[in-house]
Image: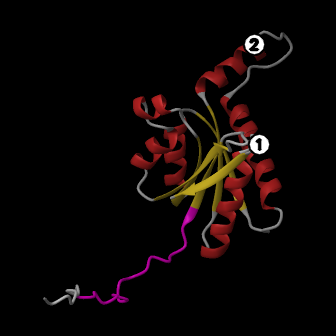
Amino acid sequence: MDKSRAKAPAEAFDDTAAIDDRARNVLVHLTGSEIDQCLIREAGTYVTGTGGKLVLVNTMAPNEFMERQQAHAQIDHLPTYTICQAEESCRQHALKRGRQALVAFGIDYTAVGMVGRETDSLLTTAQQYDCGHLFLGDQQQSLLRRFTALSFSQVITRKFDGLVTVLRSARDEGKSNKRRWTMQG
């Protein structure tokens, strides 16, 4: 009885395939949470290594804008809260977050503030600044939520024609209750 093993033919490595190493502009979606600093640093590292430009986007939802506008309207001596003011407030927040996270990198970045639906705003900004890579933060969802609705990052990933890196937050199951971050992309 022959006990020799049948050997599968080994496939040769094809090193003639083109490697996509062009510089990509990177868009980072800021959420106002603790994940922002980590996202900005990761994107900054990516941009430093590949070239391209870094765009930080902070978005205000329409309902939040309307709440602020109504709050301003109730105070007599304050002028009407405008979309321009809201966008500038968001832009200033993005500038501040960028300064805090990128101090060690010494790279330039563009800060953008927008009012509107997050998905539409991000996709519009990515197109406007010719971004080929998005960095998003995504909070861990309950099992039921995962089965019934798409997360924000899943919606963006399906609509965006480019690379998407998602930084996920998960609570450690120990006594420390600290967050750990995992990259996916």
Name the residue rendered at 50%, 77% in the picture: 21
Q: In this view, does 102 lie above or below 35?
A: below
Secondary structure at badge 2 equals helix
> Residues in magenta?
9-25
Q: Distance between the residues labelled 2 and 1?
A: 23 Å
Secondary structure at badge 1 equals helix
Front residue of 130/3: it is 3
**Residue hosting label 2:** 73
Instruction: Answer left or right for 107 relative to 77.
Output: left
Q: Label 2 sits on what residue type? A: Ala
**Residue hosting label 1:** 93
Q: Main secondary structure of the magenta part?
A: loop
Is residue 28 located in the magenta-colored stretch of the structure? Answer: no
Mark earlier in primary sequence (2, 1): 2
> Which mark is on residue 10?
none
- Which image quadrant for residue 54? bottom right
Tally of numbered tags:
2
Is residue 20 located in the magenta-colored stretch of the structure? Answer: yes
